[in-house]
Image (spheres, helix red, strand yellow):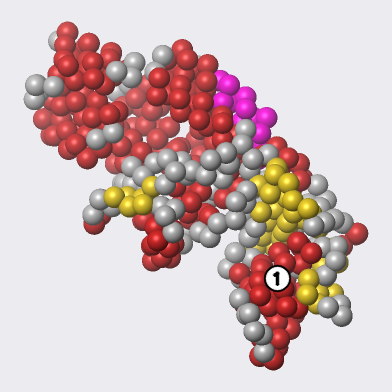
Amino acid sequence: MDSLITAAARALATGDPLGALKRVALRDDAPALALRGIAMAQLGDLVRAKTLLRSSARAFGPKAAVARARCVVAEAEIALVSRDLGWPQRTLAAARATLEARGDRVNAAHARHLEIRRLILIGRLDEADAALAALDPEPFPPALKAAHGMAVAGIAMRRLRTKAARAAYARAGQAAQDSGIPGLIAEVAGAVRMLNAPAARLIARGRERLLFLDEVGALLASETVVIDACRYVVRDQGAVIKLGTRPVLFSLARAMGEAWPGDASRETLLAQAFRAKDADESHRARLRVEIGRLRSALQAVAGVSATKRGFTLTPRGGREVVVLAPPIDEQHADALALLADGEAWSSSALALALGVSPRTVQRALDALAAAGRAQPFGQGRARRWTTAPAPGFTTTLLLPGPLPSD
């Protein structure tokens, strides 16, 4: 490897893509193409970066197995950043195996972290946790230690383990400082700000207040009956009743939860569940049917009792009833929670992460775009969606992946 390639590689390792390009911008040999591709990726031109890396892999030829595997890992990272979650994982796994077999443990570990980050994004936390447990970050360079800490913190946040998340972010922050890479330092700092932001609203006995993530964890660990409007479930310490596919029942439960310990009037329930401004007898008949279904669904945690005005919840054991709502009520909040990470998502990646059909996601994105909450760029398969996160709020509870009691 000549001195210019070595200098360019060192510049990229310290987060200086322009310094790297100054040395290899006019070269078309395989190592220079690879370094140019990584530099363009750091500068944000992902399309050009992908083209350069593929050209580099072809130029290296079949005998340079390690170099080709490194190109595959770099292309996989671009796919992850551009939220192309359908990128072939077998290709990355094969490249990682090649790097491990040839003794390139650092790049093999980097490939493993890319696999873990993808698992976290799509909510497969148990698999991500098991993969992280098999990695010892001590021999890693600082940048890779920071990535390891961020992955640990990401899993801990989604499981509401705020102490573990803070400790992991502290390790990641120190490693980022040791690396001297400004972009990495800023990424860790941004994640810490999200951890310290309000995560939800508590609605209890007619009053509202914001909750931070550690307070949410304490609430879910208590005996309180929680009507969780972030995950569309009703839960207490011993049971989780999922109503995500039964929106009418959840709307009724939420309306009664917001009115507790009083009752919710029939007019309120009809408006919440059926959007019925002028209810007739057919609406009232349907309400009686849905109340019966809700009573059956919630029997493990609470009863549903009729009053003169409407209906009220009667929790088992005289427990409290509260509603846990997003910090800002927003239609299609789950899609917004993913877009809030600042990256550009494809509609297929959003569908994969949310576990719904691409058509459902497309309808949500079209509605968000019409409301000015999301914007697309690109055409066809290259189209991506992005939006700015809601200022001052975290959307952890809306991200895919089970909470501790699920």
Residue 211 located within the stretch drawn in magenta: no
Residue under the point 36% across and 56% down:
348
Q: Tell me if residue 126 can be seen.
A: no
Q: Please state the horizontal and vertical placement of residue 138, each as a whole percent of the image.
A: 50, 16
Q: Tell me if residue 347 can be seen.
A: yes
Residue under the point 33% across and 47% down:
84
Residue 170 located within the stretch drawn in magenta: yes
Residue under the point 61% across and 69% down:
247
State which region is magenta: 159-171
Q: Is 396 left, or right, of 147 in this rendering?
A: right
Vertical relation: 381 (above or below) 16: below
Q: Amino acid at mark 1?
A: Leu
Question: Which residue is labeled 1 in the image?
Answer: 252
Nearer to the camera, 337 or 299:
337
Quarter occupied by residue 361: bottom left
Q: Residue furthest bottom?
A: 281
Q: Is 76 left, or right, of 399 in this rendering?
A: left
Residue under the point 85% across and 75% down:
305
Q: Please state the horizontal and vertical placement of residue 116, each as a whole percent of the image.
A: 45, 37
Figure disc tally: 1
Vertical relation: 172 (above or below) 336: above
Q: Residue furthest top?
A: 3
Nearer to the camera, 218 or 299:
218
Vertical relation: 300 (above or below) 277: above
Q: Please state the horizontal and vertical placement of residue 375, each as a whole percent of the image.
A: 36, 52
Quarter occupied by residue 294: bottom right
Q: Please state the horizontal and vertical placement of residue 30, each as a whole percent of the image.
A: 13, 25
Q: Secondary structure at mark 1?
A: helix
Label 1 Cα neighbours within 10 Å, binned few <14 / some 14-19 / many ≥20: many
